[in-house]
Amino acid sequence: MTDVITARNLAKRYGKVEAVVDVSFSVAEGEVLCLLGPNGAGKSTTVRILATLTRADGGTAVVAGQDVSLQPRAVRAAIGYVAQNAGTDGYLTGRENLLVQAAAHRLRRGSAIRRATELLDLVGLAGAADRVVNTYSGGMRRRLEIAMGIVHDPRVLFLDEPTTGLDPEARASLWRELRRLRAEQGLTILLTTHYLDEADRLADRIVIIDHGTVIVSGPPATLKAELGPTGGQDGPNLDDVYRHHTRTRLTLGEELAG
Ligand SMILES: Nc1ncnc2c1ncn2[C@@H]1O[C@H](COP(=O)(O)OP(=O)(O)OP(=O)(O)O)[C@@H](O)[C@H]1O
Ligand SMILES: [Mg+2]
C-alpha cells in the first residue's frame, strides 16, 4: 500500500512553547489514523502542519505525494481540512454553505450544484438542505462541515475533533458517514479525538502523542494485546492503553523530578 501521509521528525515551536518536538508517522491510502493525546499535546499543530496551515520548524511531511513546505498549493488541492472550531455560515442554508465552499475551490456552477446535492445526501442532510444552518443541531452542523471539507473530492481528509460536543447518537451517525466515505470514496482520514472508544471503533491505527512527541503507535488491537491481561474482564481496552502509556510518562517525570 502506498503512503498518502508521511510525517518525519516534525517540530514546531511558538516562542518558548515547543508545540511539536518530534512527530513521525505515516498513513496508507484508505486508512483511518487517530491522533490521541492530552490537551496541549500538539495534535492540532501536527494536523495544521500537514494541512499546510502552519510551517514546521523542523522535519518533513509529504501529503498526497507532495512536500507540504515545497508544494503547499498542490497539497491543498488534494486535501480537505475541518478545523477543531470549524465554521458554517448560520444565515445560509446547508446547500448555500456548500455552494460557497465549492466556489472557493473554483468548481463550475453546474458541477457545484450537482456536488452539493450529492454531498447533502451522503451526509444525511438532504431533508434539511434548504433550511438555514442556525436551525441545525450540533451534529447536523458538524456533518455539514465535513461535507464542506470534501466538496472538492480530496484524497485525504483531516478532521480535528470532529465529534466533540456531539451526543452519542450524533457521534454514531458521524462514524457511519466516515466509514462510508472511506469505503465509497477511498478517502484517507486523519482525525484527532479525545474519545477513546471512538478511536477504537474507527481507527486502523492509533498514534498517541504527548508533549509534542509520539509515545506509541499501532493498530488498536496490537496496542491492547501488548498490554497483556491487565484490563477488565474483557481484556484491556483502549482506555487502559492510553492510561498505561500516559502513566508511564508521568512516573518517569516524577522520577526525574525526584
Ligand atoms: N498559534 C499558537 N501560538 C502559540 N502557542 C500555540 C499556538 N498553537 C498552539 N500553541 C501551543 O502549542 C501547544 C500544542 O497545542 P495544540 O493545539 O497543538 O494541542 P492539542 O493537542 O491540539 O490540544 P487540544 O486537545 O486541547 O486540542 C500548546 O501548548 C498550545 O498552547
Ligand atoms: Mg487540538
Image (cartoon, grey):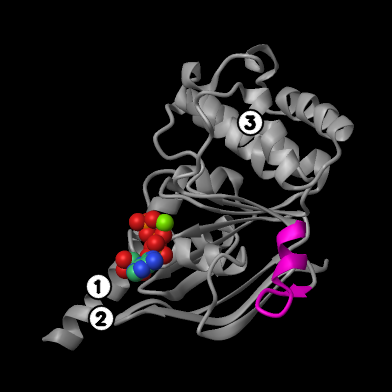
Identify residue for label 1: 250
Q: Residues within 10 Å of mark 3 (few under 14, many from 20)?
A: many
157 in relation to 209, above or below: above
Q: Is residue 24 magenta?
A: no
Q: Amino acid at mark 1?
A: Leu
Give the percent coordinates (x, y) of residue 118: 80, 27
Residue reaching furthest to the left = 258
Position above or below: 202 against 1: above
Neighbour tally class for label 1: few under 14, some 14-19, many 20 plus, Cα within 10 Å: few
The residues colored magenta run: 66-78
Local secondary structure at mark 1? helix
Between the C-alphas of marks 1 and 2, the distance is 5 Å
> In the rendered structure, which disc, 3 or 2, sits on the residue that comes first in sequence?
3
Task: Specify whether residue 240 is in view.
Answer: no
Secondary structure at numbered mark 2: helix
Rendered residue at 47%/66% (across/down): 45
| Pointer 1 or 3: first along the chain | 3
* Identity, as a three-letter code, of the amino acid under mark 3: Asn
- Front: mark 3 or 2: 3
Quadrant housing the C terminus: bottom left
Residue position marked by numbered label 2 in the rendering: 252
Q: Total number of numbered labels? A: 3
Secondary structure under badge 3? helix
Q: Marks 2 and 1: in contact by CB < 8 Å?
A: yes
Q: Horizontal placement of 143 versus 87: left or right? A: right
Circle 2: residue type:
Leu
Q: Hey, which quadrant is residue 59 in on the image?
A: bottom right
Provide residue 31's location: percent of width, then percent of height: 71, 56
